[in-house]
Image: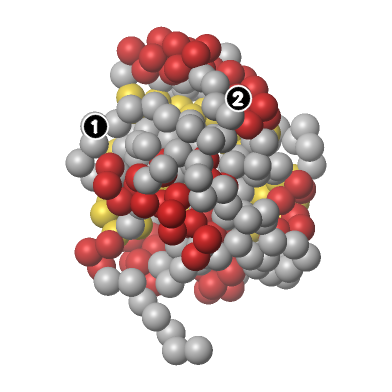
């Protein structure tokens, strides 16, 4: 198959998300680079298909060396697609929760989407999205359930936040209460990314409904994250949020959140 590259204008840097954190929005999804005190860095998530060149170009401009690892919040196509190519290029491992393993080792694909969930263009198009499985076996390092820190992300807590997928994780830095959430929740209406991701002011929404597998777990995960009292939110979809008011806004959102997957 011929190599395809996404045009440069589909990638928009998200500068200064928090201390030591740079972001990149590729079309409708965000990735993040996290610097460490020794000047090494870790890539969080790996974008949509054909985005590897965009990610490498961004990395070369913002970081002085290759990352030490890629950490995946989960294995959906818009968070994992460039992981294999990037990991081979940089010769680094890819970390994910052990419950994501079947979807990252070529064993299983994710369940089909719920096209009626939430309305919006993304829901209607969801049957066309790749569901895997991808095979990252040669690079994959699995996180045990309950493992809450790893050496490639020093000073960050790994929080298992199932619901959107079984092995979804979020990442929390207690020093400044920064929370990288993957798809545990969004700051744009997830079923209408193309309509809202750029023009809409950031506001809190649940995870993408069409691909969320367990709504009870998703709700509990959002409430668990609120107990961390975050003040900086870096989502997989939508714009980051920061400020003293974020903690209370997120607490209110979490307390009121309820979703049956159909609305």
Q: Is residue 63 left or right of residue 75?
A: left
Q: Is residue 145 left or right of residue 167?
A: right
**Could you say where residue 230 lies in the image, as x and y percent from the top left?**
47, 20
Residue ranking furthest to the bottom: 2
Q: Earlier in the sequence, mark 2 or mark 1?
A: 1
Q: Secondary structure at mark 2?
A: helix
The residue identified by callout 1 is 201
Label 2 environment density (alpha carbons within 10 Å; few <14, some 14–19, many ≥20): many
**Could you say where residue 183 lies in the image, as x and y percent from the top left?**
51, 40
Residue drawn 59% across and 42% down? 212
The foreground one among 67 and 116 is 116
Label 1 environment density (alpha carbons within 10 Å; few <14, some 14–19, many ≥20): few
Visible residue check, residue 42: no
Quote the CA–CA distance across marks 2 and 1: 23 Å
Residue drawn 43% across and 54% down? 124
- Asked if residue 52 is positioned above or below residue 22 in the image, the reply reads below
Residue drawn 77% across and 32% down? 146
Q: Quadrant of residue 215?
A: top right
The foreground one among 242 and 59 is 242
Q: Quadrant of residue 56?
A: bottom left
Q: Secondary structure at mark 1?
A: loop
The foreground one among 183 and 245 is 183
**Could you say where residue 45 lies in the image, as x and y percent from the top left?**
51, 52
The residue identified by callout 2 is 219
**Could you say where residue 152 lies in the image, as x and y percent from the top left?**
61, 47
- The mark total stands at 2
Residue drawn 33% across and 12% down? 245
């Amino acid at each position: 198959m011929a190599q395809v590259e996404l045009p440069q204008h589909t990638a928009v840097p998200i500068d200064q998300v928090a201390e030591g954190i740079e972001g990149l929005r590729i079309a409708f999804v965000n990735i993040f680079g996290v610097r460490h005190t020794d000047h090494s860095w870790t890539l969080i998530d790996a974008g949509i298909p054909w985005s590897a060149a965009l990610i490498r170009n961004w990395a070369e401009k913002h970081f002085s060396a290759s990352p030490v690892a890629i950490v995946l919040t989960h294995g959906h196509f818009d968070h994992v697609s460039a992981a294999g190519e990037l990991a081979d290029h940089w010769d680094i491992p890819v970390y994910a929760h052990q419950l994501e393993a079947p979807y990252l080792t070529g064993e299983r694909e994710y369940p089909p989407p719920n096209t009626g969930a939430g309305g919006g263009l993304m829901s209607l198009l969801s049957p066309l999205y790749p569901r895997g499985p991808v095979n990252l076996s040669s690079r994959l390092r699995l996180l045990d359930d309950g493992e809450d820190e790893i050496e490639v992300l020093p000073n960050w807590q790994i929080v298992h936040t199932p619901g959107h997928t079984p092995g979804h994780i979020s990442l929390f830095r207690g020093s400044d209460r920064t929370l990288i959430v993957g798809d545990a929740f969004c700051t744009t209406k997830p079923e209408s990314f193309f309509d809202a991701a750029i023009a809409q002011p950031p506001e809190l929404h649940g995870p993408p409904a069409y691909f969320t597998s367990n709504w009870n777990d998703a709700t509990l995960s959002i409430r668990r994250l609120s107990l961390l009292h975050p003040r900086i939110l870096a989502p997989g979809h939508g714009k980051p949020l920061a400020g003293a008011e974020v903690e209370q806004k997120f607490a209110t959102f979490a307390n009121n959140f309820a979703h049956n997957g159909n609305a």
